[in-house]
Amino acid sequence: MTVTDLAVAAAATYFAVFGTGFVFKPELVERFALRWTDPAGKTEVRCYYGAVSWALAGFLVYLLTQDLAVEALTGVLFLATAVFAVRVIGTIVDGGRTHPYTRMAIPVEAAFVVAVAAVRFLA
């Protein structure tokens, strides 16, 4: 295993552990004592809703320029499927199915997963 392989494995482990913590114990967010209306909370929203999205977009464009469109689309499918699955399961567990955001998000995310999967596997 090269140093690069080790770094990628370490990063994957970090994201997997961090993600698992928040999927199974969303109350962990209280440890950060953040509210989106506070300065640090606004920065956190910018980082995890804004910067992470920018980074993913940049990485997808990078893969595309490297002639790795299938790999990029596979990554999009992993991401979209994970978001959709956690949204559906979380909605059931947390009881948020009547919220207007959830009622909009589930069908939109489902359609996105189906569309990406269709392009990935049928094109």
Image (cartoon, grey):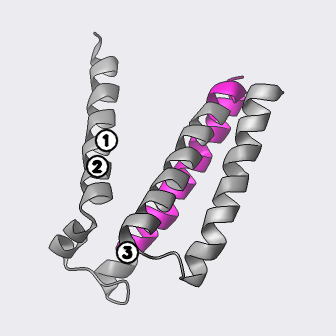
Residue at point 32% right, 85% down?
Answer: 39
Q: Which residue is mark 2?
A: 20
Q: Residue 58's quadrant in the figure?
A: top right
Q: Which mark is residue 116?
A: none
Write the residue at 54% across / 82% down. Answer: 98
* Magenta span of residues: 44-72
Q: Is residue 38 above or below residue 45?
A: below
User: Residue 24, position in %: x, y?
Assistant: 27, 56
- Residue 100 horizontal/vertical position (percent): 60, 83
Along the line of sight, the residue nearer the viewer: 94 or 72: 94
The crowding category of the residue bearing disc 1, from other C-alpha atoms within 10 Å (few below 14, some 14 to 19, many at least 20), is: few
Whether residue 30 is situated above or below residue 66 in the rendered picture: below
Image quadrant occupied by the N terminus: top left
Q: What residue is drawn where x is 79% and y is 35%? A: 119
Q: Amino acid at mark 3?
A: Thr
Q: Position of residue 97 (x, y in %)?
A: 52, 75
* Closer to viewer: mark 2 or mark 1: 2
The residue that mark 1 highlights is: 16
Residue at the spot 54% in from the left edge and 56% down from the top edge: 53
Q: Is residue 112 above or below residue 75?
A: below
Residue, far left: 31
Of helix, strand and loop, which one carries label 1?
helix
Q: Which mark is residue 43?
A: 3
Going by the numbered disc 1, the residue's amino acid type is Ala
Q: Nearer the viewer, residue 23 or 42?
A: 23
The Cα–Cα distance between marks 2 and 1, rounded to whole angstroms, is 6 Å
Question: Does the magenta portion include 100?
Answer: no
Mark 3–mark 2 distance (CA, rounded to whole Å): 22 Å
Contact, mark 2 vs mark 1 (Cβ under 8 Å)? yes
Q: Secondary structure at mark 2?
A: helix
Q: Nearer the observer, disc 1 or disc 3?
A: 1
